[in-house]
Each structure stands twice: as C-alpha cells, then as structure tokens.
Image (cartoon, helix red, strand yellow):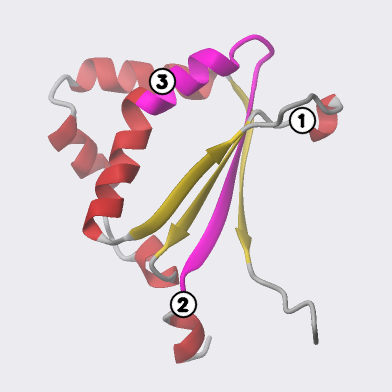
Amino acid sequence: MSDEAQDKPYVVEYYYKTRWGHADEFLRLYRKNHHPILKKQIETGRILSLSIVRPKLHATEDGRWDFRVTIVWKNIQVTNDGFSEEDLARQMYPDQETFKKEEQRRFEILRAHWDVPVVEVDAES
C-alpha cells in the first residue's frame, strides 16, 4: 500500500440484521452502549465521521439488513493500532456486569453482521 493510500481516510460499512421484531431493541442497546464509545473515538480523532441509516422499505429476507453504520476512520492504520475498545468501555461503564449483559443481548438478537470496507471509484476513468 502506498504512503498516499495509507494517509487517506478509510471507510467501512457495518451491516446489522436483527431477528424479526428486535430492530428497535437492538438500536436502543446500540445507542446506549456502543455509540458513546464510537463518539469518544471521534473526539480523539481516530474516527472522522459516523452515520447510521436504516432502509425505509423492506427487502427479501436474504438481502435484508436493518442498520448500516458507516464509519470514516482517520486512516487504515488506526483500525489496527492496538487501541482497546474494551479498556475504553471499562472507563465509561463502571457497571461492567450490566454493560456486558446488555452487549451480549445486542448480539444475541442479531441474525447476521458483516463489515464492508469501501473505496471510491473514479467514474470518469
């Protein structure tokens, strides 16, 4: 990878597919426990931006997803720099028993989760 490519923002789309009827519960738990951790990383400059979207209409079951979280990382290196979200979570959530229980529940109600790094394509060339 060139130095220029390493210095560019790195975009990853994170897809979440919940069990039917559990999307609102997933979003509540995500907002309570995980989103604040990501916001702290925005404050430190590791993450440049973050957005969350959901489909307005439904899709077929095989292509269905409930939430797409797009994170623009500062660069690709920060995604593998030894930063510990677990350490940050311990600082932010002193009641680790509740935090871990709620995070476990958030993943129990998922049917699928996948991450898709994306790159910009020049439409003119």
Decide which of tag 1 and tag 2 comes sooner along the chain: 2
Q: Is residue 121 left or right of residue 3?
A: right
**Residue segment shown in magenta:** 8-31
The mark nearer the N terminus, 3 or 2, is 2
Helix, strand or loop for disc 3 = helix
Up-down: is 116 above or below 19?
below
User: 97 or 56, which lies in front?
Assistant: 56
Q: In the rendered image, which residue does mark 2 sit on?
A: 8
Q: Position of residue 89 (x, y in %)?
A: 23, 36
Please, is residue 37 above or below residue 50 in the view? above
Which of the 4 quarters of the picture holds residue 17?
top right
* Residue at which label 1 appears: 64
Q: Are marks 3 and 2 in contact (CB under 8 Å)?
A: no
Number of the label disc, if any, that sits on residue 29 = 3
The mark total stands at 3
Q: Is residue 18 magenta?
A: yes
Q: Residue at x 29, y 40 (%)?
A: 37
